[in-house]
Image (tube, rainbow, N blue to C red):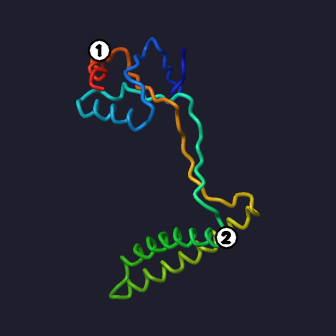
Amino acid sequence: MTEHDFGRPVDSGQQQLIATFDDYASAQRLVDRMSDDGFPVQYVRIIGDNVRTVEQVTGRLTRGRAAAAGAASGAWFGLLIGLLFGLFAVGPGWIWLVLVSLLIGAAWGAIFGFIAHWSTRGERDFASVTSLKAERYHVYVDAAHADQAARYQLKM
């Protein structure tokens, strides 16, 4: 069986399975332990089987919530701009410059957040977080380093 990883073939004759896990964190811990022990981890792959998209709905998205989220992100941007301009201000006036930039950023962010949500015409009235999940995670190592990696099979 041959799979492709960014154009580089992954052939079972060139790779040796080291371990299989039900969750990604466990596979990551194994590779981290290998790295800590000095194993050349550039020859290691973590391959997920039966990958699916999972979208966790976090709540209803109203125009008000969209405007509030836009205001928050706009405020951060305004704060950044205010601090950059504040570097060139003389005296205590830089505080007002930062505050005004923050408020202008929040206002424009709220406007753009509201308009962006309004323009969808209710097609997506919820907020969510999307992630990828696999049924199993396999840790493979190149065949040339299989003997060195064999000791990690025993530590699991």
The three-letter code of the residue at mark 2 reads Arg
Q: Quadrant of the C terminus?
A: top left
Point out the residue furthest to the left here: 37
Return the x and y of residue 133 as percentages of the image width and height.
Answer: 53, 38
The residue that disc 2 covers is 63
The residue that disc 1 covers is 147
> In this rendering, is residue 123 above or below 99?
above
In this rendered view, identify the residue nearer to me: 103 or 120.
120
**Left or right of residue 32: residue 97:** right
Point out the residue furthest to the right here: 121
Q: What's the residue at 49%, 29% (across, down)?
A: 136
The three-letter code of the residue at mark 1 reads Asp
> In this rendering, is residue 8 above or below 122?
above
Q: Residues within 10 Å of mark 1 (few under 14, many from 20)?
A: few
Q: Name the N-terminal-most of marks 2 and 1.
A: 2
Return the x and y of residue 41 as percentages of the image width and height.
Answer: 33, 29
Residue 79, located in which quarter of the rendered image? bottom left
Tag 1 secondary structure: helix
